[in-house]
Amino acid sequence: MQSAETTRRRILDAATEEFAARGIAGARVDRIADASGASKPMLYRYFGSKEQLFEVVFTSHVIANSDRVPFDASDLPDYAARLYDDYLADPALLRLISWKRLERLSVGYLYPGLEENDVAHLRDIGEEQQRGTIRQDMDPADVWSLLISMASTWAETSITDVARPEDAAALHARRREALAAATRAAFSPPARPRP
């Protein structure tokens, strides 16, 4: 007999696929139940509703990204490059973010309930600004938003070109280097003029 945690995990995996492909409105509980091997009543018992299931899937991907790529304000170029790699490893993350933005929160803060993560990141950026390692003429919230946007340049939501794991290693290396260079140029303090 399967454990409750195994069943829950199968439902979350099937729901991730369904929501990433079809969004909240387009997702069907029947398909999630069929793909997971669980019944619809069991799915509702575990998660309450399709909307609640989406929120669990969404939050789990956001937290997993945060756990896999710990934030380091003292090295923004490296952090951006590590985010590039994580977006390759979890393409569903950016799709889920896009669907939530399109179908739930068209404006404002996208991660209600997870504010403490960003508060800590903004604090760390502010501390680095005080140390003089990050330019001080930008609000920490703007540094954070721009950094995340830059790191997702080639992610699933790209308006130019989406990176794929099967792309040549040299192409991934070039993108990481470009991202690190752009991050360094954008957020490093301006050079002091020589006397």
Image (cartoon, rainbow, N blue to C red):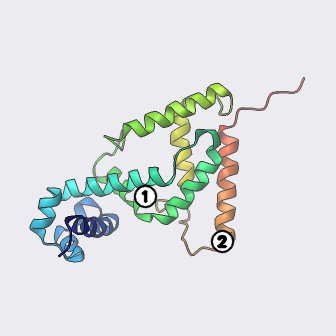
Q: Quadrant of the N terminus?
A: bottom left
Residue at 67% over, 48% down: 182
- Rate crowding at label 1 as few (under 14), some (14 to 19) or many (20 or more) other CA atoms within 10 Å: many
Out of 65 and 156, give the one closest to the viewer. Answer: 65
| Residue 154 appears in the rendering | no
Asked if residue 101 is positioned above or below residue 166 in the image, the reply reads above
Out of 43 and 6, give the one closest to the viewer. Answer: 6
Out of 31 and 48, give the one closest to the viewer. Answer: 48
On residue 169, the disc is 2
In the displayed orientation, state which residue is furthest to the right. 195
In the displayed orientation, state which residue is furthest to the top. 195
Three-letter code, disc 2: Ala
Q: Are marks 1 and 2 in contact (CB under 8 Å)?
A: no
* Residue position for label 1: 94
Place residue 184 in its image quadrant: top right
Q: CA distance from mark 1 to mark 2?
A: 22 Å
Residue at 45% over, 51% down: 67
Percent coordinates x, y for residue 41 in the rendering: 9, 66
Place residue 40 in its image quadrant: bottom left
Q: Nearer the viewer, mark 1 or mark 2?
A: 2
Percent coordinates x, y for residue 14 in the rendering: 28, 70
| Residue 95 appears in the rendering | yes
SS at circle 2:
helix
Q: Quadrant of the C terminus?
A: top right
Residue at 58% over, 28% down: 127
Three-letter code, disc 1: Leu
